[in-house]
């Protein structure tokens, strides 16, 4: 596979830094924002810049610096910024209609049919709720509760499912929950398979099975303090939690356990879905017969960032009556057209295959940092969902969030944009557009590796 075949989509000579960011034009817009918008604004604090335009896996700032985009709009830009097929579909649609609620249109049918090509045949029904990923999570939980008549939900430590009521209650990061008091009740958390920091580390290689056994215990033991839940929800690969890749046997045990206990399994594919991990959906890594009961989708589904979300679920769950769950912004046809065009491009160009092959090319290069430095705890990745977990000391594994932040800051100054996440905020995360070329990706990780080495030297 030619890993540079999408070079026509990006500005291929990135990074180009003319003025250390933020340059004067960026500064002006940043200042305006700081004085007029909420103190909750976050990304410009880690990556101080104003954006002029995006093209493929590259971003141009207001001062004409050209960045390699290894952030991908937080995992949205699978087909890259400003993808021409997606823009063409959006332009063709916007003059015809934009807002249609859930009344059928030809564009809507095209999106459903294109999704059908990639969804497992067991997930026969698609529901488009509100426009964000959080909306899809809300709908998935509502569907599970409605069908089972049960109220409790089991989620996993390290989970990120969104910022609305139920989605936030399913999200573990204390910084998002602080000061809010009670959230939606009935949510319990159990350990995910995080082999680098497992609470079951004493089990060595089997820590994944112990995590699955814990889930089984809470469902079986009448003294566990858990009521029988409507559903177990988990990310097929945890994203914001630090790009945590569960073992196949952990996920397969979770599937077996949920089935045995008649509990629905919801896989949140909002970040890991649509090619990101080297398969169309990340759950496909866990075997041909691994099929969740409900999945959530958003982010890349809007093509180049048009807001849209959906859930797909099994036929027997299709019991809710018309109007049980509604919402004004469920039918943005520009987003649907963009999504259908993006999916078409992904399928026709085997974008998941490209992500898998490029990920395999990048991972060994980044893995060198585990051996060459003392501050990289673990490099892990699946497709183009890659993480560098930073520690103070490889032996103690003490998390080093300030080092992850420094990587983002210094890489940004040198023209590479990345994300930061993790249980301790100590994970540098790469989520580049899947159309990134080998040339740009190697340049990008070259900058990151240089930055890590410089940080270790105290530069
Ligand atoms: C796995 C997962 N679920 C849900 C969400 C929430 O999506 P949104 O921010 O569109 O509400 C996110 C966002 O990062 C996510 O990564």
Image (cartoon, rainbow, N blue to C red):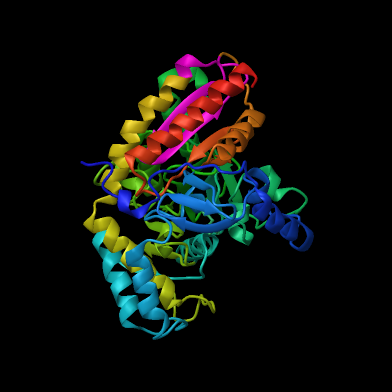
> Can you give x and y, in whole percent of width and height, for residue 406 in the image?
63, 32
Determine whether, in the image, residue 126 is placed left or right of residue 42.
Answer: left
Task: Tell me, yes or no, whether the highlighted magenta stretch contains residue 192.
Answer: no
Q: Is residue 422 among what the camera can see?
A: no
Determine whether, in the image, residue 190 is placed left or right of residue 365.
Answer: right
Front position in the image: 25 or 185: 25
Res 128 quadrant in image: bottom left
- Above or below, 90 against 56 in this view is below
Residue at position x 68%, y 46% from top? Answer: 45
Task: Tell me, yes or no, whether the highlighted magenta stretch contains residue 391.
Answer: yes
Front position in the image: 305 or 109: 305
> Can you give x and y, in whole percent of width and height, for residue 351 in the image?
29, 50
Q: Which residues are magenta?
A: 370-394
The C terminus: image quadrant: top right
Q: Is residue 146 among what the camera can see?
A: yes
> Can you give x and y, in whole percent of width and height, for residue 192 in the image?
50, 37
């Amino acid at each position: 596979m030619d890993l540079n075949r999408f070079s026509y989509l990006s500005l291929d000579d990135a990074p180009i830094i003319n003025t250390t960011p933020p340059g004067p034009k960026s500064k002006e817009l940043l200042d305006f924002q700081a004085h007029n918008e909420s103190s909750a604004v976050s990304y410009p604090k880690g990556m101080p810049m104003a954006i002029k335009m995006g093209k493929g896996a590259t971003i141009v700032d207001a001062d004409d610096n050209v960045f390699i985009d290894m952030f991908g709009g937080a995992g949205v830009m699978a087909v890259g910024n400003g993808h021409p097929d997606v823009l063409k579909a959006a332009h063709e649609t916007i003059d015809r209609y934009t807002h249609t609620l859930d009344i059928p249109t030809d564009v809507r049918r095209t999106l459903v049919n294109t999704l059908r090509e990639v969804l497992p045949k067991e997930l026969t029904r698609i529901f488009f709720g509100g426009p964000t990923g959080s909306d899809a999570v809300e709908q998935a939980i509502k569907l599970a509760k409605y069908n089972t008549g049960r109220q409790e939900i089991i989620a996993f430590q390290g989970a990120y499912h969104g910022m609305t009521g139920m989605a936030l209650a399913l999200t573990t990061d204390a910084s998002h929950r602080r000061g809010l008091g009670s959230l939606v009740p009935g949510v319990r958390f159990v350990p995910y398979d995080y082999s680098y920091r497992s609470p079951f580390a004493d089990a060595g290689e089997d820590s994944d099975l112990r995590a699955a056994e814990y889930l089984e215990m809470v469902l079986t033991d009448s003294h566990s303090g858990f009521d029988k839940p409507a559903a177990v929800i988990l990310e097929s690969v945890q994203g914001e939690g630090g790009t945590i890749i569960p073992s196949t046997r952990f996920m397969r045990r979770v599937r077996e356990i949920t089935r045995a206990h008649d509990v629905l399994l919801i896989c949140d594919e909002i970040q890991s879905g649509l090619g990101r991990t080297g398969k169309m959906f990340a759950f496909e890594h866990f075997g041909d017969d691994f099929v969740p009961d409900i999945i959530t989708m958003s982010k890349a589904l809007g093509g180049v960032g048009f807001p849209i979300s959906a859930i797909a679920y099994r036929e027997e769950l299709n019991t809710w009556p018309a109007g049980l769950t509604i919402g004004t912004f469920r039918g943005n046809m520009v987003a649907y057209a963009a999504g259908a065009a993006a999916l078409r491009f992904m399928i026709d160009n085997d974008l998941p295959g490209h992500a898998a092959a490029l990920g395999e090319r990048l991972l060994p290069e980044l893995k060198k940092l585990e051996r060459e430095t003392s501050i990289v705890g673990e490099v892990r990745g699946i497709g183009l969902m890659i993480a560098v977990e930073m520690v103070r000391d490889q032996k103690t594994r003490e998390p080093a969030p300030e080092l992850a932040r420094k990587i983002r800051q210094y890489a940004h100054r040198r023209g590479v944009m990345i994300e930061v996440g993790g249980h301790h905020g100590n994970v540098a995360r790469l989520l580049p557009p899947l159309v990134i070329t080998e040339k740009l990706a190697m340049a990008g990780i070259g900058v990151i590796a240089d930055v890590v080495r410089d940080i270790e030297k105290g530069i």
